[in-house]
Image (cartoon, rainbow, N blue to C red):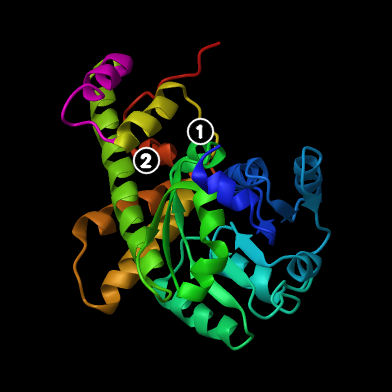
Amino acid sequence: MNSATAKAESNPQRVGLVGLGAMGRGMAGSLRRAGVDLHVFDVRSEAAEAFAKEGGTACATLADLGARCDVVVSVVVNAAQTEAVLFGSADQAGCAATMKPGSVFVMCSTVDPNWSIALEARLAALGILYADAPISGGAARAASGEMTMMTAGTPAAYAKCEPLLNAMAAKVYKLGDRAGAGSKVKVINQLLAGVHIAAAAEAMALGLREGVDPAALYDVITHSAGNSWMFENRMAHVLAADYTPLSAVDIFVKDLGLVLDMARASKFPLPLSSTAHQMFMQASTAGFAKEDDSAVIKIFPGIELPKASK
């Protein structure tokens, strides 16, 4: 038992987690292993019920989860979905109306930093503490509790949720005492991630165009100075012809859009980010929006991509 797990187990708080997708399910699993009193919600009720069969409680509504829990962790796609989690939608009420004063909302999505700053003030008016806590590392690291969290929040918010953050992540960076800093660092991380995926796809596409054996190219690059984590991870998907979306093309349409919005506000030039964003936009409009982000390689003409082995 590590120290983070021990602290989480000794924490009497009830914890809610919203969003049992690729990242959220792994994070919920880490909290369950840490022994917390865990409550989960997903728009797919069957996902929440299946998870709860092995431990934890499935909540039928967001309002129910908010009323039950002292800390709510939101792992949804974007700011609009986070708004719905908190303040409701046409389908159901959100959790903010039922969360107790002094409870904490932990926001793990990639969002506009200015939106995150404003959300902290909105929740403070309701007596709810807020942690700006975007995540990185992928589904496998989320499942093993080894992902990274880029966080910012008040000392009062950290006092209530820090043991839980440490139970979900191997690295929890505390970047400021108010919202915004965590989201800014995540947006910069996404700049690099998106550019690296686009560059990896371009390199592999050139190799295919020139008749280089793609498996040999992959082996050489992953053992050479030109390698990157994204090349090694995403070009393996291309070699396997597996475009199952662990992170979809449209995620980087959104995230690189946030990168450019942040830079545009201060008139800061980002030529590589702009080009990568256009590449993902092209892939999206070509019909690959919901495929794995490595499908950006499909925009290159005159190449024959690897086919799935039978």
Residue 229 vs residue 266, the one in the foreground = 229
Residue at point 32%, 71% (across, down)? 262
Residue furthest to the left in view is 225
Residue shown at 48%/38% (left/top)? Answer: 141
Q: Which residue is mark 1?
A: 243
Residue 277 shows in the view: no
For the residue carrying disc 2, how many other residues have a C-alpha within 10 Å: few (<14), some (14-19), or many (20+)?
some
- Is 218 within the magenta? yes
**Quarter of the image holding residue 306?**
top left
Picture quadrant of residue 299: top left
Residue 299, numbered circle? 2
Residues tagged 1 and 2 counted as in contact (Cβ below 8 A) = no
Towards the viewer: 148 or 281? 148
User: What x and y, as percent, mark residue 254?
Assistant: 45, 60
Q: Nearer the viewer, residue 32 or 62?
A: 32
Q: Is residue 106 shown left or right of residue 64?
A: left
**Residue at (58%, 46%) from the top-left corner?**
6
Vertical comparison of 267 with 126: above or below? above
Location of the N terminus (image quadrant): top right
Q: Secondary structure at mark 1?
A: loop
- Tell me, for residue 223, which label it has, or none: none
Q: Is residue 155 magenta?
A: no
| Type of amino acid under label 2 | Ile
* Stretch in magenta: 214-228
User: What amino acid type is highlighted by mark number 1?
Assistant: Tyr
**What is the x, y in percent for residue 282?**
39, 50
Q: Residue at x 49, y 67 (%)?
A: 158
